[in-house]
Image: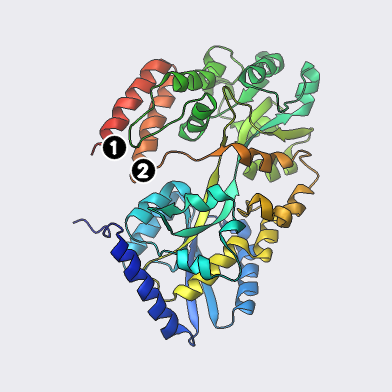
């Protein structure tokens, strides 16, 4: 039996707004409990979240926050189970990739009116792409609470030993390959670069090539630009041999290879900076990723949303505001390297403390990369889309299929998926 909520219509939006108004009147004088579910709060951040809850409850007497967490691998199964059982949290987190599924099924509370009436924030508070990522059908359904980008992180000692200049704003793909070639010393288990060959990397590299993945209104995967992009990824292993194969890695992950001083460059996210600060015993720095025909960088964002079924919409909204932009939250995320608040460039004075952390020296690249940020294609059946593309990319990476055949097959399979 299909238990999915009905699609969003203007009538459902209006009815929800009316229900919110009634709930605000009925619950104004009552103590209210907000149930909050998070996947970005790992065990190492429980104490930080509890400290933030103390601040919030002190500033909002009569509202209490009860939190629960789940790891990313089980989070969405738990969330769907809670909704099916009629036990949905009042506030919960969604990443951009899963947001469309929930928004399109009518499970989220519209927050346009709440945002317009807020005394604490407005639309200009947030990085525009982050705020827009959590709108659907012209309706805002959440606020971005964190963002991450992906950068080129490089071992300065290996660059110096190879006599290669550090990456700068003039670099393009050819410069990456040239530097990686100069650094690679495979007999001594040193390679020039590691860069994933998977959906999350490919959609961005395709844009760097001047192409990109689209699935609506038409599917565009197998294009000349996208074939060039996939060649750039897999040829590092199969042609230039500057990136270790699975056999050469011998079960050691690329993060450990970089920390061990065995990689000149690694393409990974800002969430790894603290790990490298704590474990790398060589000089290293970061740069905005070079492009091919143009630059393009990842943009990952997580939002706090309110369930349409909540009985405490005002209290839930206040907690969402707090998570998104309260100074205590912004500072705690910086102090604990717990991602970054998704504030607009005009409001990033609050993030000055982040830029003042001495390592890596080029932290400004984190915000510079936002100039080139793009989001991936997203559909309601997102997991199937990603699985199809990842299967074909893996076949190309392993040499089981040519780049051309892999993308032709991905095109055909995704067309069949979206036609269902």
Residue 248: percent from the left, percent from the top?
57, 20
Quadrant (top left, top right, bottom left, bottom right) of the C terminus: top left
Residue 96: percent from the left, percent from the top?
47, 48
- Above or below, 41 against 248 in this view is below
Whole-number angstrom distance, CA of label 1 to CA of label 2: 8 Å
87 sits to left or right of 165:
left
| Front one among 232 and 20 | 20
Does label 1 or label 2 sit earlier along the sequence?
2
Q: Quadrant of residue 12?
A: bottom left
Residue sitting at x 34%, y 64%: 13
Task: Tell me if I can see residue 398 in this picture.
Answer: no
Per the image, the residue denoted by label 2 is 379
Q: Quadrant of residue 160?
A: top right
Outermost residue, top side: 239
| Front one among 390 and 46 | 390
Residue 311: percent from the left, percent from the top?
40, 76
Q: Classify mark 1: residues with Cα within 10 Å, few (<14), some (14-19) or many (20+).
A: some
- Above or below, 91 against 127 in this view is below
Circles 1, 2 touching at the beta carbon (< 8 Å): yes
Residue 387: percent from the left, percent from the top?
37, 35
| Front one among 187 and 328 | 328
SS at mark 2 in the image: loop
Residue sitting at x 74%, y 29%: 155
Task: Tell me if I can see residue 16 in this picture.
Answer: yes
Outermost residue, bottom side: 29
Per the image, the residue denoted by label 1 is 418
**How are the colours assigned in the image?**
rainbow
Quadrant (top left, top right, bottom left, bottom right) of the N terminus: bottom left
Q: Quadrant of residue 358?
A: top right
């Amino acid at each position: 039996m299909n238990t999915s909520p009905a699609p969003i219509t203007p009538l459902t939006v209006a009815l929800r707004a009316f229900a919110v108004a009634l709930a605000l009147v009925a619950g104004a004088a009552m103590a209210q409990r907000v149930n909050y579910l998070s996947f970005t709060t790992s065990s190492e951040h429980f104490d930080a979240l509890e400290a933030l809850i103390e601040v919030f409850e002190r500033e909002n007497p009569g509202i209490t926050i009860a939190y629960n967490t789940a790891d990313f691998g089980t989070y969405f199964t738990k969330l769907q189970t809670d909704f099916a059982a009629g036990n949905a949290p009042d506030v919960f987190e969604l990443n951009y990739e899963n947001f469309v599924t929930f928004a399109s099924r009518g499970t989220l509370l519209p927050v346009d009116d709440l945002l317009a009436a807020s005394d604490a924030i407005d639309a200009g508070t947030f990085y525009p792409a982050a705020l827009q990522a959590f709108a659907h059908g012209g309706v805002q359904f959440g606020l971005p609470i964190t963002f991450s980008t992906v950068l080129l992180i490089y071992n300065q000692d290996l660059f110096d030993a190879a006599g290669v200049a550090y990456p700068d704003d003039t670099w393009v793909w050819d410069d990456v390959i040239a530097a990686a070639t100069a650094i690679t010393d495979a007999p001594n288990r040193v390679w020039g670069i590691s860069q994933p060959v998977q959906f999350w990397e490919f959609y961005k590299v395709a844009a760097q090539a001047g192409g990109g993945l689209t699935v609506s209104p038409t599917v565009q995967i197998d294009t000349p630009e996208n074939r060039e992009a996939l060649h750039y990824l897999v040829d590092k292993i199969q042609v230039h041999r500057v990136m270790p194969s699975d056999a050469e890695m011998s079960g050691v992950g690329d993060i450990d290879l970089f920390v061990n001083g065995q990689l000149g460059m690694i393409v990974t996210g800002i969430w790894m900076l603290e790990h490298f600060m704590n474990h790398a015993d060589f000089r290293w720095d970061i740069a905005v990723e070079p492009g091919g025909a143009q630059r393009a960088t990842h943009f990952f964002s997580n939002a706090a949303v309110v369930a349409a079924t909540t009985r405490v919409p005002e209290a839930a909204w206040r907690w969402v505001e707090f998570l998104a932009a309260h100074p205590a939250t912004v500072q705690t995320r910086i102090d604990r390297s717990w991602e970054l608040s998704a504030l607009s460039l005009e409001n990033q004075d609050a993030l000055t403390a982040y830029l003042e952390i001495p390592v890596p020296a080029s932290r400004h690249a984190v915000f510079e990369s936002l100039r080139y940020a793009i989001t991936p294609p997203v559909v309601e059946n997102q997991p199937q889309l990603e699985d199809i593309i990842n299967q074909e990319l893996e076949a190309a990476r392993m040499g089981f299929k040519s780049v051309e055949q892999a993308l032709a097959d991905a095109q055909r399979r995704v067309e069949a998926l979206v036609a269902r």
